[in-house]
Image (cartoon, rainbow, N blue to C red):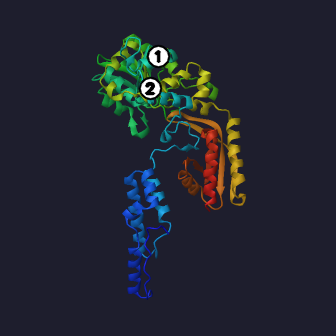
C-alpha cells in the first residue's frame, strides 16, 4: 500500500446498517488527499515528467472514482494499486491526440489516415529547413526580398511542361483562388456531369459560388457536347472549365468533350480553359493497367491554360494545391488577395520541393515516393510480407483458437483518385473462436501504435500492401496481445 494511504479504522458490528455506514466513513476517511499524493515519491516523479495540470487532474479523477465506488458499495477498501491507476490516467491525459498509426486497410491514399506518406529523405529535408532559418523569401544573389514560390516554379515547369506555377494549401483553395482571380463576377461554363462533390461534402458549385464567379451549366448529366459549350459563350464568359470526376465514374450512354477539343474552342474564342484535375498524377499509370488516367503533363500538352491538382494524393507529397499554366494567367492569380490567405508555409514548401526532385526521373519517383511505391509494388512482394506476418502470428498464438491464412484480395488507391480501379493484393485473414472480428478490430485500434484494419464476412483483414516492413513487428505484437487477452 502507498505510504500516504492512512490505515482505516476497524468497525465493530459490521453486519448492521449503522456499522456499514461507519465502515464506509472509515474507508472514505482513509482516502489520501491530492496534496498528500503530490508530496509522495511517485507524485514528485510525476511532476518532473508530466504537466502539473494533468497530474493534478488525474489524481482528482482517480480519487473521485474510488470515492464513488466506495459510496456505491462496489469497493470496500482503498485500492493498493491507486498509484498505477493514477499513472495510467496521467499518461492518457498527457498523450498526444494526433498519433502515428499503421495502415493495414490497403487503401493507399487514405484520407482519414493522413493521405500520402512522406519518405525519410523528404522528412530529413523538411526537418533541416524547420530547424533553422532559410531563404524562404530572400534572394541570396541580390540580397533582397524574394518570392517563396520561386523555389518550386522552375521544377514544376520542367516536370509538367507548363510556363509557370503556384502552390496553395490544398486543391479546393487552388480552384477558389483561380476562379476568384480570373472570373469573379463573370460566367464559368461547366458540364453538368462534372459538378462533383468531393470529401467532406465540399461541392464544386459551392466553391465556385464562394469565388464570386457565375456558374453556367451546360449539357446533361451523362452527355455534354462541344456545341453545348459553344452555344453558351457570350460577352460575359470568363472561363471554360473541366472538372475531373475524381471519386466516381460514369459508364454506359455517356459522352464528354476532350481537353483538346475544349482547348481548341478556347483558342478560337479567346477564352481560357481551366482543368481541375483533382488528384493530379505526374507519372504514366499504364504499368498498373490504368490507360485512361490523364496526367498533368497530358492536360498541359492538350492545351489547358490553367491546371489545378493536389499535392498529397497521387503526387505523393504534402497537402497542397498546385496551379500550373500560362504565365500571364499565373501572374494574375499570384496578385489575388486570396493567395495570402491560402499560401503554404516553409515546411510544406520544403517537403514539396523535395518530393518534386524525385520526379526529375520517373523511375526514381516510383521507388522513392511512398504513394507510388505502394501502388506500383509487385504482388509477389506483397505476398511475401503477408506470409511473414501470418507465420509470425502463428508462432506466438495458440492455433487451436485461431484461423489465419494469406488470401488474395483487392486494394484501392483512395483519396478520390482512380475510382473503380482495384489493385491485386494479399491480405492476412484472421478469425478467432474466442473473439469476433469487430472485437479484434476495436482492440487493434487501441494498441500502441494503433493498427487500422478492415472487416469482410466477419473476418479481420490485414492488407500487406500498406504495411511497411518496419511495421510488421508492431502489427504482429498488436494481434498477439489482442488474441492473448482471451
- Sequence-earlier tag: 2 or 1: 1
Specify the quadrant of the image occupied by residue 141: top left
* Residue 149 sits above or below residue 424 on the image: above
At label 1, counting other C-alpha atoms closer than 10 Å, the crowd grade (few under 14, some 14-19, many 20 or more) is: few
Numbered disc 1: secondary structure: helix
Left or right, 236 with reference to 268: left
Specify the quadrant of the image occupied by residue 425: top right
Residue 293 image position (x, y, % from top left): 55, 26
- Residue labelled with disc 2: 349
Residue 290 appears anywhere in the view: no
Residue at (63% x, 57% y) in the render = 483
Q: Extreme left residue here?
A: 185
Numbered disc 2: secondary structure: helix
- Residue labelled with disc 1: 261
Q: Nearer the viewer, mark 2 or mark 1?
A: 2
Q: Which one is nearer the viewer's eye here, 21 or 212? A: 21
* Residue 353 sits above or below residue 66 on the image: above
Mark pair 2, 1: CA separation: 35 Å
Residue 370 image position (x, y, % from top left): 57, 32
Residue at (61% x, 54% y) in the render = 458
Residue 418 appears anywhere in the view: yes
Q: Which one is nearer the viewer's eye here, 147 or 245? A: 147
Left or right, 364 with reference to 346: right
Q: Which mark is residue 269?
A: none
Residue 277 image position (x, y, % from top left): 46, 26
Residue 159 image position (x, y, % from top left): 52, 17
Amino acid at each position: 500500500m502507498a505510504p500516504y494511504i492512512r490505515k482505516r479504522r476497524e468497525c465493530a458490528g459490521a453486519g448492521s446498517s449503522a456499522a456499514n455506514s461507519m465502515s464506509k466513513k472509515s474507508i472514505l476517511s482513509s482516502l489520501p488527499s491530492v496534496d498528500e499524493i503530490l508530496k509522495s515519491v511517485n507524485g514528485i516523479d510525476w511532476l518532473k515528467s508530466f504537466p502539473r495540470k494533468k497530474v493534478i487532474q488525474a489524481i482528482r479523477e482517480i480519487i473521485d472514482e474510488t470515492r464513488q465506488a466506495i459510496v456505491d458499495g462496489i469497493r470496500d477498501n482503498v485500492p493498493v494499486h491507486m498509484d498505477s491507476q493514477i499513472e495510467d490516467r496521467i499518461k492518457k491525459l498527457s498523450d498526444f491526440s494526433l498519433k502515428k498509426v499503421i495502415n493495414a486497410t490497403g487503401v493507399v491514399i487514405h484520407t482519414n489516415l493522413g493521405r500520402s506518406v512522406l519518405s525519410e529523405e523528404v522528412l530529413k529535408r523538411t526537418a533541416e529547413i524547420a530547424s533553422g532559418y532559410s531563404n524562404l523569401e530572400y534572394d541570396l544573389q541580390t540580397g533582397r526580398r524574394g518570392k517563396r514560390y520561386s523555389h518550386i516554379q522552375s521544377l514544376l515547369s520542367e516536370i509538367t511542361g507548363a510556363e509557370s506555377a503556384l502552390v496553395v494549401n490544398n486543391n479546393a483553395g487552388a480552384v477558389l483562388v483561380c476562379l476568384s482571380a480570373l472570373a469573379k463576377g463573370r460566367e464559368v461554363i461547366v458540364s453538368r456531369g462534372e459538378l462533383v462533390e468531393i470529401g467532406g461534402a465540399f461541392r464544386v458549385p459551392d466553391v465556385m459560388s464562394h469565388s464570386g464567379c457565375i456558374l453556367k451549366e451546360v449539357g446533361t448529366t451523362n452527355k455534354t457536347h462541344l456545341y453545348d459549350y459553344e452555344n453558351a459563350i457570350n460577352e460575359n464568359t470568363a472561363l471554360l472549365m473541366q472538372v475531373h470526376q475524381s471519386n466516381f465514374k460514369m459508364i454506359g450512354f455517356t459522352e464528354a468533350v476532350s481537353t483538346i477539343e475544349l482547348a481548341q474552342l478556347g483558342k478560337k474564342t479567346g477564352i481560357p480553359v481551366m482543368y481541375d484535375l483533382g488528384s493530379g498524377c505526374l507519372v504514366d499509370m499504364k504499368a498498373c493497367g490504368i490507360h485512361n488516367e490523364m496526367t498533368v503533363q497530358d492536360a498541359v500538352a492538350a492545351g489547358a491554360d490553367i491546371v489545378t491538382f493536389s499535392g498529397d494524393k497521387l503526387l505523393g507529397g504534402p497537402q497542397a494545391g498546385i496551379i500550373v499554366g500560362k504565365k500571364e494567367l499565373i501572374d494574375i492569380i499570384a496578385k489575388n488577395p486570396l493567395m495570402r490567405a491560402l499560401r503554404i508555409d516553409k515546411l510544406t514548401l520544403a517537403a514539396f520541393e523535395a518530393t518534386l526532385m524525385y520526379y526529375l526521373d520517373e523511375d526514381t519517383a516510383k521507388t522513392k515516393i511512398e504513394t507510388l511505391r505502394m501502388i506500383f509494388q509487385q504482388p509477389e512482394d506483397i505476398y511475401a510480407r503477408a506470409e511473414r506476418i501470418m507465420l509470425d502470428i502463428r508462432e506466438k498464438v495458440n492455433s487451436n483458437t485461431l484461423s489465419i491464412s494469406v488470401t488474395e484480395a483487392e486494394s484501392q488507391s483512395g483519396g478520390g483518385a482512380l475510382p473503380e480501379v482495384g489493385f491485386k493484393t494479399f491480405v492476412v485473414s484472421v478469425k478467432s473462436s474466442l473473439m469476433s472480428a469487430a472485437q479484434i478490430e476495436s482492440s487493434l485500434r487501441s494498441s500502441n501504435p494503433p493498427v487500422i484494419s478492415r472487416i469482410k464476412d466477419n473476418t479481420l483483414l490485414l492488407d500487406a500492401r500498406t504495411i511497411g516492413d518496419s511495421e510488421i513487428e508492431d502489427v504482429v505484437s498488436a494481434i498477439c496481445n489482442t488474441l492473448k487477452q482471451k
